[in-house]
């Protein structure tokens, strides 16, 4: 079953739209949250939630069950031949066949090892994972040079619309497409707490997704004269100091409300440290990270 991709104001809304497109209930679908909305200025939610979904593939019936069904069919045919000899023998033979069948099924079930039953129960999930991995491998990637051309052209036109002379520097970094905008007077593209820059990054992602036309494309990170990188380094230092307090003093540290990308960055930093665990708590747009002793 092909994947469908939907967007909404929240992850739940995007899932509901995906279910409407697939025409199934939530128990018959599997989801992949591609992106969550971010918290902007004054706690307002910015951006959209993006979700991929598809109908859960049905795994083929285990071979042992198919053989058992075949044996039932064969025995049913033998019972029909005996039934043609007379009504009394039909009733007696039918009851005996049913009893024999139940005994045979019970014996087969008892003889079947527990390990085999567990493997058969796990077969649908294994098949689904394998099929999902195969579909991902079959999706053709969009060439990085083409992605850079699309993103660079869009951002240059955006700068012209703002009356700015923008130079776009785009490079591939660890599989991501890192874009840095250079020029004078680019503060208007940043905004308070990078709110405008985050919005531009989201628009660029949508532009690239549309141009990809179903192909795989890289994660885009848009920066303005390195301000995002400098802010990330400052955040890394802040998280590291807070983690040291948690580990040494055994206290709990609650951070201020953060956007989804910032929360992910905090979790990544904490994962590199020992003796500290992190978790996101609360509901959007008031979701925040909490550090506790591990």
Image (cartoon, grey):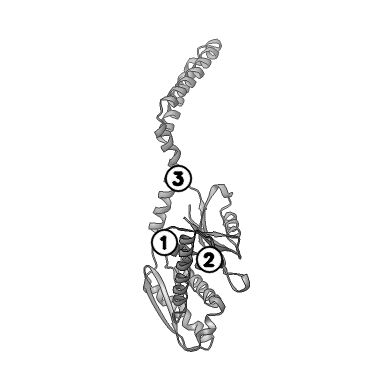
Which label sits on residue 273?
1
- SS at badge 1: loop
Which label sits on residue 12?
none
Q: Nearer the viewer, mark 2 or mark 3?
A: 2
Image side of residue 218 versus residue 94, left or right? left
Above or below for 211 versus 78: below
Q: Nearer the viewer, mark 1 or mark 3?
A: 1
Going from the N terminus, do you reach mark 1 or mark 3 first? Answer: 3
In space, the residues marked 1 and 3 are separated at their CA atoms by: 33 Å
Residue 156 place in picture, x, y as percent: 47, 83
* Residue at horizontal 55 percent and vertical 77 percent from the top: 196
Residue 180 place in picture, x, y as percent: 43, 79
Q: Can residue 293 be seen in this view?
A: yes
Going from the N terminus, do you reach mark 2 or mark 3 first? Answer: 3
Residue 60 place in picture, x, y as percent: 44, 40
Reading the image, the residue beneath label 2 is: 260
For this rendering, which residue is in front, 26 or 187?
Answer: 187
* Residue at horizontal 46 percent and vertical 25 percent from the top: 72
Dot 3 alpha-carbon crowd within 10 angstroms: few under 14, some 14 to 19, many 20 or more: some
In space, the residues marked 1 and 2 are separated at their CA atoms by: 21 Å
Which label sits on residue 125?
3
Above or below for 129 versus 99: below
Q: Can residue 214 be seen in this view?
A: no
Dot 1 alpha-carbon crowd within 10 angstroms: few under 14, some 14 to 19, many 20 or more: few
- SS at badge 2: helix
In space, the residues marked 2 and 3 are separated at their CA atoms by: 29 Å
Tell whether label 2 touches label 1 (CB within 8 Å): no
Tell whether label 3 touches label 2 (CB within 8 Å): no
For this rendering, which residue is in front, 171 or 149?
Answer: 171
Dot 2 alpha-carbon crowd within 10 angstroms: few under 14, some 14 to 19, many 20 or more: some
């Amino acid at each position: 079953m092909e994947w469908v991709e939907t967007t909404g104001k929240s992850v739940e809304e995007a899932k509901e739209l995906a279910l409407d497109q697939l025409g199934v209930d939530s128990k018959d679908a599997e989801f992949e949250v591609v992106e969550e909305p971010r918290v902007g200025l004054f706690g307002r939610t910015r951006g959209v939630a993006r979700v991929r979904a598809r109908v859960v593939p049905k795994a083929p019936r285990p071979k042992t069950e198919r053989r058992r069904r075949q044996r039932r069919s064969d025995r049913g045919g033998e019972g029909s031949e005996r039934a043609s000899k007379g009504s009394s023998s039909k009733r007696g033979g039918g009851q005996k066949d049913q009893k024999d069948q139940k005994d045979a099924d019970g014996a087969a079930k008892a003889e079947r090892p527990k390990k085999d039953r567990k493997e058969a129960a796990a077969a649908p999930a294994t098949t689904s994972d394998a099929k999902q991995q195969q579909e991902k491998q079959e999706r053709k990637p969009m060439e990085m040079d083409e992605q850079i051309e699309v993103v660079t052209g869009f951002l240059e036109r955006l700068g012209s619309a703002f009356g700015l002379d923008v130079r776009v520097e785009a490079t591939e970094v660890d599989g991501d497409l890192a874009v840095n905008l250079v020029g004078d007077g680019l503060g208007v593209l940043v905004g308070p707490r990078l709110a405008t820059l985050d919005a531009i990054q989201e628009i660029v992602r949508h532009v690239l997704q549309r141009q990809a036309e179903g192909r795989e494309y890289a994660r885009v990170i848009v920066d303005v004269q390195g301000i995002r990188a400098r802010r990330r380094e400052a955040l890394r230092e802040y998280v590291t100091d807070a983690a040291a307090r948690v580990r040494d003093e055994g206290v709990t540290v609650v951070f201020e409300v953060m956007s989804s990308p910032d929360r992910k960055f905090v979790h990544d930093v904490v994962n590199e440290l020992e003796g500290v665990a992190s978790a996101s708590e609360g509901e959007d747009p008031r979701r925040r990270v909490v550090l506790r002793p591990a």
